[in-house]
């Protein structure tokens, strides 16, 4: 079992090139990737996305890549562009009647004014090789972090499923006792309304059968136990657990619990149903983080 929440970082330095990669992931319905990387490597974003897709199935993932390469061309100022921006800013300043003059700091804050020196293809490719290794290392670390958190989630889910199973035992025990009790209660109520010779025994038996059917929660309990078995098998499986399937099964479990609560018509069972729904909600919150 793997969580969709995790953080990892990797740093690698080779041939004067230092790459820093940070990856953050949170739960998400599908795999959603946001990638921030140096401008000269933006053409490699598809490669980064493919690497992430190979490692992760679901989650909202943010990848941040920084590169520091010694010996690369220094930043240059594009004087023509700076002059054009200055004239435009001056005209705007006069039009808006702004007293403060346009400063050099204002011009240098415009991205297009600072032009990075051109790098040859070999230098860019050398940077990408280091970045690719760092991304793989960060993805491996993220995978380990997600697995570790998945183990903790699995422990919590197993404990909660055990609580649900124990509560279900108690619900079934009460449910089995209630049918004969309700039968006698119905017979006593009818006896109070009519003399014994006026009771239609056949009609009474029919009403008892209908009442028993309304009160019988055995089918719901059987289905709920089947869902519990599926969840426990998923938690024990060595194959990656599927969060989508578990989430669907929780919806089915919640439906059975609601039916039990509506059919039982018993204060003790109603109290237990509230506890079951609380446990299911806590499980649902945890399952949202499972890949």
Image (cartoon, grey):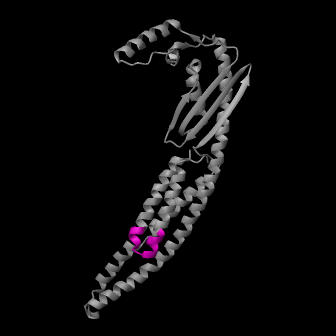
Horizontal side, residue 152 vs residue 81: left or right: right
Q: Nearest the camera: 258 or 123?
A: 123
Horizontal side, residue 70 vs residue 215: left or right: right
Q: Position of residue 55 (x, y in %)?
A: 61, 35
Q: Hey, which residue is sitting farthest right in the picture?
A: 15
Highlighted magenta segment, given as a residue range: 261-272
Report the residue at 69% width, 24% height from top. Answer: 18
Horizontal side, residue 170 vs residue 88: left or right: right
Q: Position of residue 197 (x, y in %)?
A: 27, 93
Q: Nearest the camera: 104 or 268?
A: 104
Q: Nearest the camera: 86 or 38?
A: 86
Report the residue at 55% width, 36% height from top. Answer: 61
Residue 223 shows in the view: no
Q: Quadrant of the C terminus?
A: top right
Query: In the rendered structure, does residue 89 fall within the stretch colored magenta?
Result: no
Residue 211 shows in the view: yes
Magenta region, mostly helix, strand or loop?
helix
Q: Is residue 171 above or below residue 283?
A: below
Q: Position of residue 24 (x, y in %)?
A: 59, 37
């Amino acid at each position: 079992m793997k969580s969709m929440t995790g953080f990892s970082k990797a740093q690698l330095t080779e041939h004067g090139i230092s790459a820093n990669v940070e990856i953050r992931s949170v739960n998400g319905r599908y795999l959603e990737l946001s990638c921030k990387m140096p401008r000269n490597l933006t053409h490699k974003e598809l490669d980064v996305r493919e690497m992430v897709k190979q490692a992760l199935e679901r989650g909202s993932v943010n990848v941040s890549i920084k590169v520091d390469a010694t010996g690369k061309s220094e930043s240059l100022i594009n004087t023509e562009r700076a002059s054009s921006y200055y004239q435009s800013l001056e005209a705007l300043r006069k039009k808006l009647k702004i007293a403060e003059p346009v400063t050099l700091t204002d011009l240098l804050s415009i991205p297009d004014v600072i032009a990075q020196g051109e790098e040859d293809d070999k230098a860019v490719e050398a940077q990408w090789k280091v970045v690719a290794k760092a991304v793989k290392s960060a993805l491996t670390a993220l995978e380990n972090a997600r697995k570790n958190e998945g183990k903790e989630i699995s422990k919590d889910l197993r404990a909660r499923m055990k609580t649900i199973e124990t509560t279900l035992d108690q619900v079934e025990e009460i449910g089995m006792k209630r049918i004969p009790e309700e039968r006698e209660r119905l017979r006593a109520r009818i006896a109070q309304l009519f003399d014994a010779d006026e009771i239609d025994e056949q009609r009474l038996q029919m009403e008892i059968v209908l009442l028993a059917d309304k009160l019988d929660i055995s089918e719901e309990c059987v289905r709920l136990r089947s869902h519990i078995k599926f969840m426990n098998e998923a938690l024990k499986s060595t194959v990656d657990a599927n969060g989508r399937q578990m989430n669907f099964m929780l919806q089915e479990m919640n439906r059975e619990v609601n039916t039990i609560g509506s059919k039982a018509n018993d204060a003790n069972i109603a109290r237990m149903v509230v506890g079951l729904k609380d446990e299911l909600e806590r499980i649902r919150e945890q399952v949202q983080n499972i890949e």
